[in-house]
Structure formats: C-alpha cells, structure tokens
Amino acid sequence: MTEQQPASPAPDLWTTVDALWRWLEQNQPVSGREGLLLRMLKLSEEVGEVAEAVIGATGQNPRKGRSHTWDDVQAELCDVVITALVALRTLTPEPRGVLEGHVGRVAGRSLGGGGPEGAGA
C-alpha cells in the first residue's frame, strides 16, 4: 500500500493570471503597441485550437478521423479562458474587478435580476 501525498491547494486564479502576465511581460520578444496587439491576437489562435479540437472530436475531417477527444476540447477552452484573462490583465491592473463588473452587467441583461437568485447587478 502506498502512502498518498496530501493534495496541494489549487493556485489562486488571479494570482496565477498576474504571474503569467509578469512572465510574459519579462519575456516578450516584441513590446509596445505591436506586442499588445500580438497578445490580443493570441486569443484568436487559441479559439482556432478549440475549433480544431471540436473537428477532431467529431471526426469531421475524413483524412484525420477522430484525432481529439472532448477532454482535449475542454483543455483548449481552458487555454482560451487563461489567454483572455492574461490579455485583460495586460489592459488593466484590476482584471478581477473589470470581469466581475462585466459579468454583473451581462447577468443583469440576460437573467433580468443580475444573477440566478434575481439579485440586482
């Protein structure tokens, strides 16, 4: 019988986003306006990878067949979310507040009361 290691706590989302942003800022080969635009374009690349994974999971390319799984699609969607959050962090030092405010406005429009419980946004 092997002894199980205690699970390490999941990293805080916003701490991780900020760390990824700092890492990219320190290691970007292109900076300034062009670097900013390239960071935003990275999001399109990641969305394309979602499309590729969906096509692969459904076997829509007869030449490749089923080249991906739905787990691959989930992973690619996570990459889209991470990339979007890092892009948002690039534009503002307060991405959490910007996102929460926007989610509240979308919920208010879509759910009528700001959320599933009907609270105002």
Image (spheres, grey):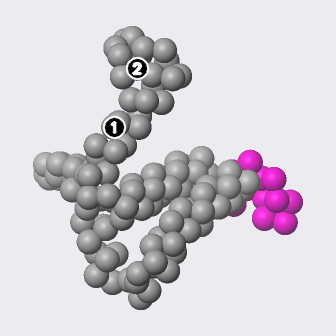
Determine whether 115 is above or below 77 in the image. Answer: above
Amino acid on which the number 2 mark rests in the picture: Gly
Number of the label disc, if any, that sits on residue 114:
2
Measure how far apart labels 2 and 1 are at the Cα level.
Answer: 12 Å
Quarter that holds the C terminus: top left
Number of the label disc, if any, that sits on residue 14:
none
Farthest residue, direction front: 33
Residue at the spot x=82%, y=59% of the render?
Answer: 61
Q: Look at the magenta stretch and give its main secondary structure.
A: loop
Which residue is the site of mark 1? 100
Residue at the spot x=39%, y=57% of the render?
Answer: 88
Give the x, y percent position of residue 91. Answer: 37, 61
Farthest residue, direction bottom: 29
Give the x, y percent position of residue 81. Answer: 45, 52
The region drawn magenta spans 57-68
* SS at badge 2: loop
